[in-house]
Amino acid sequence: MIAHLILRRLLGAIPSLVAVVVVTFLLTRALPGDPAAYFAGPAATPQAIEEIRHKLGLDKSLPLQFVDYLGDLARGEFGQSLTTGQPVAQDILARLPASVELTLAGLILALIVALPLGVAAATRPGSWIDHLARVVSTAGVSLPVFFTGLLLVYVFYYLLGWAPAPMGRLDLFTSAPRTITGFFLIDSLLTGEFATFRAAAAQLTLPALTLALFSVAPLARMTRASMLGVLSSDFVRTARANGLSRGTVLVTYALRNALLPVVTTLGMVFSFLLGANVLVEKVFSWPGIGSYAIEALVASDYAPVQGFILTMAVLYVTLNLLIDVLYGLIDPRVRIEA
Amino acid sequence: MNPTLRHIRHVLSENPVTGLAFAGFAAILLLALFGPLIAPYDPLASNTDQALRAPCWEYWFGTDHLGRDIFSRVIVATRLDVQISLAAVALSFALGAPLGICAGWYGGRTDRMIGRVVDTIMAFPLFVLAMGIVAALGNSVVNIVYATAIINMPFYARMARAETNARREAGFVEAARLSGNGDARILAAHIFPNILPPMMVQVSLNLGYAILNAAGLSFIGLGVRPPTPEWGIMVAEGSAYIVSGEWCVALFPGLALMLAVFCFNLLGDGLRDIIDPRRRT
Amino acid sequence: MNLLEIERLSLEFRTRGGTVRALEDVSLAVGKGETLGVVGESGSGKSVLSFAVMGISDAAATVTNGAVRFEGLDLLGDGRSALDELRGAEMSMIFQNPRVALNPIRMVGKQIADVLSRHAGVTRDQAKTRAVEMLAKVRIPDPERRARAYPFEMSGGMCQRVMIALALACSPKLLIADEPTTGLDVTTQAAIMDLIGDLARESRMSTILITHDLALAAERCDRIAVMHAGHVVEVATTAELFAHPRHPYTAKLIATTPRPGVGLAELEPVPGALPDLRGDLPSCRYSARCERRQEECADGPLARLIDPTNAHLVACRRPL
């Protein structure tokens, strides 16, 4: 049944993917900068540029260009980066794990804080923890993520000296672990390089915390609201009337049901998180695809920007797919009707 | 006293923070209007002798790396940031509300087509889409407004659709139809005024998000160019000095940004209380 | 000794709009193996009373006076800590709208097993087996398969059977059935009531049947207590209550109940509405609706006329 559900969701994601590819293509055509002029070199005659334009297929009609574009995508051909001189696909693949590791670490941190906070606020309405949750929810969404990142750097690096300099995934004296998953935390554990693990964790802490601060708000808010609803529901009353222990009532009965709207919110949270990721990568010189795109933007190097947008969008569609499947795992109503 | 005013007064007395948010909103608008008159220094005048000074009597917020007065720059920047977010939100409202109302009213194919457009926008992480739009349209302030408007449009469309749908069968709509009003007139004169209050809550919450989005774009070098004073770009300029401990260059514009967004969010929550006290969370 | 004794119980809800005095001086007793009906309009405090007995009242509720004794144990005082162990084991409750009263995302067999492994001291595996046995006991066909079903896959009647299985899993001594047939169709209603009656008789279980339906109570209960606006206004055996109602409200209620030989047109509703339970109330809360009202009804302690021969109890100064 799960396989059936996944298949259905995969099919359901196809329109989103098509939309993403079309929009990216249109953005690509609108991007300034003439690839033909670039490939022809600075000294080329207009005639030579025209020839190259023809060779690249840029003189064809828009639908035909779209077909070419699809062909390029199918072959994993994202163009060449001017700044790094490498194929964009290769650059992005090399940098993607850094971004994903950071985003996931931020999300996990946020969940660790937001779920208990939301539950505690809902079980004790009007208490100090409820007020705390309210303040966090409103203040959290007001925080400009690049600004909180800088504040954290100032406090924990400059003033207290607890955190390492905000200079990427590892300090200068540590070398990267052998690539297995591309996630430094996991790879260093797998290869048993615990010093590397500690260094990577130290570098990751502040940027992940910045992302977490920002995404705790919507998650805590949703957890609190949905937990409040579930706690006053009839089936929780039944569970209490049957004398089930407080823990069972709270976790097995209330929380599992309350998680459903929270899982739905995750979609929106990921949208914000992936965007905020770009800013956080800039603040912490994090070598992910966000800072790659920013460098390219500044240098008016557009092939990496296209690759970046497409990658982010595909990543986001994939995450939404995972969220759908997760929802189905929790809620039998979705699973069985599939 | 009329009941609406009494209700507003009741909500304000229940939650004084809302009153504070209204006051803050007024203050932001005043700063946006009269900022350049209040600013003690020319926000663009550099004075390298006085570079990177800590806050003091002469320079309340200190000076930046070019010796420009940060206080003046923060004050003057209010206008640009407020302009960008107001324009973007007005634009996404003007785009999203009619689309949503049509989708909710006509249903069927219209609904599906509009839904497809909205879903396409929502298929992207919104900030990333905004980056792409600004990169494609060209690096300018106007294009930041367009990009912000486009990524916010789905929220208005979805909300207007849901609210219209809920009122499609309402008594007052039926009455209007029976007295011979056409679709266009019913939508403009009956549906729209009724869905306006909940939409205003969204507008207020969205203003904060629009400012954050615009500041984020200029932080990564899109849209606003130096030396124009704008909060996002000022934080970006200050970010280089944080690691060496010169905090005031980034702190004050960052705080201004944060306070403005906080104020808009509180205002949104407060408006929600006034419009629908039951939906308080 | 009675199984359950409720003595002069008063309960308030403290809300923003004021204090709601939802129960006042409520006294009731349930004997072993007895079925007691509690009837009244919605809002009369029937459910509030049952929640208070089970100790699952809303957080805004405060018991201001009185005692609830279960087998002599004071559930509001010394026995408070034992309540967790009693609920679901010695006393349990079934609710109206069974489809929403079950956890929507947990298999029904597991929900029954949860109760068993909490109270019956059995392993998880044994609990599963016993859950299937319970489903068979409440006459659910194909219990093995049904144990793995979710509430949304079952009809309302099936869900109510599951609720009964859940409540009776640990063979409680007291079952509180709060409008157990509301929201079910008529044939299912009878089947559910038969099932509850049969299972209660088998194990000499006491039952409190809470309903707004006087006819249903007449059919199923040994004794009936009539509630109005947080007061118990009359308690008597079913036969006595219908033969000689003494409280004007009871008489009106009976007049509103459809019965053979009386045309629907002859039925008249009880005039007036339940009073607002906030602020000052007259000592007889029915007096505003009562045709036999006199000056003295508004104040002074409420009269309790007790007929010692058949324990007929009335809270009225001018009984019929």
Image: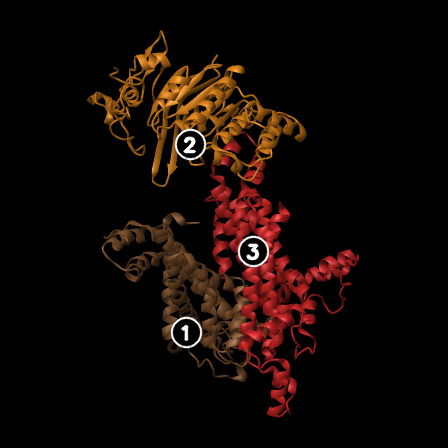
Chain colours: A red, B brown, C orange
What amino acid type should be assigned to the residue bearing mark 3?
Answer: Gly
**Callout 1: helix, strand or loop?**
helix
Q: Mark 1 lies on which chain?
A: B
Q: Mark 1 points at which residue?
A: B79
> Which residue occupies the foreground of this view, A263 or A332?
A332
Q: Mark 2 lies on which chain?
A: C
Residue B51: x and y in percent read 54, 80
Residue positioned 53% across, 15% down in the render: C202
Mark 3 vs mark 1, CA separation in Å:
44 Å
Q: Using the rendered image of the protein, determine whether residue B259 is visible from the camera's viewpoint.
A: no
Left or right of C224, for residue A220: right
Residue C288: x and y in percent read 24, 27
Residue positioned 55% across, 63% down in the render: B125
| Rendered view: C209 above or below A112 | above
Mark 2 vs mark 3, CA separation in Å:
37 Å
Q: Which mark is residue C203?
A: none
Q: Using the rendered image of the protein, determine whether residue A211 is visible from the camera's viewpoint.
A: yes
What amino acid type should be assigned to the residue bearing mark 1?
Answer: Arg
Residue positioned 54% across, 59% down in the render: A214
What amino acid type should be assigned to the residue bearing mark 2?
Answer: Gly
Left or right of C151, for residue A47: right
Mark 1 vs mark 2, CA separation in Å:
60 Å
Q: Mark 2 points at which residue?
A: C183
**Callout 3: helix, strand or loop?**
helix
Say whether marks 1 and 2 touch (CB < 8 Å): no
Say whether marks 2 and 3 touch (CB < 8 Å): no
Q: Which of marks 3 and 1 is in front?
A: 3
For the residue carrying disc 2, how many other residues have a C-alpha within 10 Å: few (<14), some (14-19), or many (20+)?
Answer: some
Q: Name the residue under label 3.
A: A12
For the residue carrying disc 1, how many other residues have a C-alpha within 10 Å: few (<14), some (14-19), or many (20+)?
Answer: many
In the rendered image, which quarter contains the C terminus of chain C? top left
Q: Which chain carries label 3?
A: A
